[in-house]
């Protein structure tokens, strides 16, 4: 969309998102091409409050407002991660609640449908969103680290490998970058996850985060908040490695074999559709890979002093791998597809390309 020369418009994005290492942004004419006759700075003087930034053209590689691989780029990735993970995990709280209870008390919560029925009968509609606060804050913190640091580590490991090896071993770089990011992201998530599981699986323990956190710390100490960090890593690191590496691969294959138009000629709508489809397919793989550890996390956070051996004795190896899996496949597939859709939508909103496929050239 082009604006008349005389118009000004206030930016909806915080100004720091526009700042990179250099201010080499350009204005566009009404055809969406660079206007070489006018190159105004996007950084106004102290007396100017409004400034004009050209919107990126759909399917075009020009007009990006945020430079790739700059502090502004990583800041945008971090904000996109907060939105994608925090909002989606909170939205599926009812499914997560049933899943956790099926894992902890399979005799009472025998199936998905009966599980919802038990919750509705015992706790009413409000009970379906028990634990939403630790879910929102915990997964927002996790998403910030997961996506922001993934973009950072992916670029870092690519630079270390060099241009030729970065292409040759790109899947290994995706795996290493996502694993590195998730190690840190889980440290941010773990305390909230511990409180969430306790609130969701022990009715009467607490109403939510505000009273659940101090009660948890009083009972088990601050160190108890990280009792589940190792199984959480066991669940989340393989999940995230699968999530990012399979997504990047699936999206590349979709553009190569399914979408008849090269990515740089596709509209934003088409690109975001590819992001959602790739995310959903990746989410199914994620659910299968990470489900055993997910059962362990729920079991350990539900009972004081519980061990992995206790979980194996009670649930059995087959139960650890399969209990609650169909629901988790549906939940994680939808969740992951929505996360990639939200994340890439935010990137498009601030003028960045969607993730995967043919990446645009980095600004020097």
Image (cartoon, helix red, strand yellow):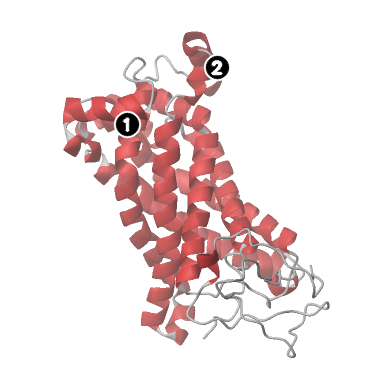
Farthest residue toward the front? 47
Mark 2, Cα crowd under 10 Å, few <14 / some 14-19 / many 20+, is few
Q: Quick check: 225 left or right of 74?
A: left
Name the residue nearer the viewer: 109 or 200.
Answer: 200
Residue 134 point in image, percent of width and height: 39, 35
Q: Can residue 285 be seen in this view?
A: no
- Kindly identify which numbered label has been placed on residue 125: 2
Q: Mark 1 points at which residue?
A: 195
- Kindly identify which numbered label has been placed on residue 144: none
Residue at the spot 43% in from the left edge and 54% down from the top edge: 144
Number of marks in picture: 2
Q: Quick check: 329 left or right of 190?
A: right
Res 36 → quadrant:
bottom right
Res 254 → quadrant:
bottom right
Q: How far apart are marks 2 and 1 (CA)?
A: 21 Å
Query: Is disc 1 placed on a helix, strand or loop?
Result: helix
Farthest residue toward the bottom? 37
Residue 272 point in image, percent of width and height: 67, 58
Name the residue nearer the viewer: 306 or 28.
Answer: 28
Q: Quick check: 117 left or right of 145?
A: right
Q: Mark 2 or mark 1, which has the lower sequence index?
A: 2
Name the residue nearer the viewer: 67 or 186.
Answer: 67
Residue at the spot 75% in from the left edge and 85% down from the top edge: 35
Q: Is residue 173 visible?
A: yes
Residue 310 point in image, percent of width and height: 22, 28
Mark 1, Cα crowd under 10 Å, few <14 / some 14-19 / many 20+, is many
Residue 291 point in image, percent of width and height: 41, 40
Name the residue nearer the viewer: 262 or 285.
Answer: 262
């Amino acid at each position: 969309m082009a604006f008349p020369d005389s118009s000004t418009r206030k930016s909806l994005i915080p100004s720091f998102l526009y700042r990179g290492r250099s201010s080499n942004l350009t204005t566009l004419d009404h055809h969406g091409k660079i206007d070489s006759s006018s190159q105004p700075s996007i950084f106004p003087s102290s007396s100017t409050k409004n400034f004009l930034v050209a919107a990126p053209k759909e399917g075009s590689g020009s007009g990006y407002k945020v430079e790739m691989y700059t502090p502004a780029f990583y800041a945008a990735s971090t904000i996109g991660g907060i939105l994608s993970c925090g909002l989606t995990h909170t939205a599926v709280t009812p499914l997560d609640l049933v899943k956790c209870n099926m894992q902890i008390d399979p005799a009472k919560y025998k199936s998905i449908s009966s599980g919802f029925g038990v919750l509705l009968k015992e706790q009413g509609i409000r009970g379906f969103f028990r634990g939403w606060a630790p879910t929102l804050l915990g997964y927002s913190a996790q998403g910030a680290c997961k996506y922001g640091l993934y973009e950072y580590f992916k670029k870092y490991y690519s630079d270390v490998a060099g241009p030729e090896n970065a292409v040759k071993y790109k899947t290994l770089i995706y795996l290493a970058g996502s694993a590195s990011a998730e190690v840190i992201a889980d440290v941010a998530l773990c305390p909230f996850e511990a409180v969430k599981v306790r609130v969701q699986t022990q009715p009467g323990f607490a109403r939510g985060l505000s009273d659940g956190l101090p009660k948890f710390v009083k009972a088990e100490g601050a160190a108890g908040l990280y009792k589940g960090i190792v199984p959480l890593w066991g669940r989340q690191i393989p999940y995230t490695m699968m999530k990012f590496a399979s997504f990047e691969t699936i999206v590349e294959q979709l553009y190569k074999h399914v979408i008849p138009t090269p990515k740089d000629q596709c509209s934003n709508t088409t690109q975001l559709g590819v992001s959602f489809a790739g995310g959903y397919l990746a989410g199914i793989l994620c659910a299968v890979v990470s489900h055993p550890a997910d059962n362990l996390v729920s079991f350990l956070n539900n009972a004081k002093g519980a061990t992995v051996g206790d979980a194996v004795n009670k649930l059995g190896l087959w139960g650890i791998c399969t209990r609650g899996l169909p629901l988790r496949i549906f939940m994680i597939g939808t969740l992951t597809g929505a996360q990639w859709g939200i994340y890439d939508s935010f990137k498009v909103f601030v003028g960045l390309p969607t993730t995967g496929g043919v990446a645009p050239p980095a600004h020097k």
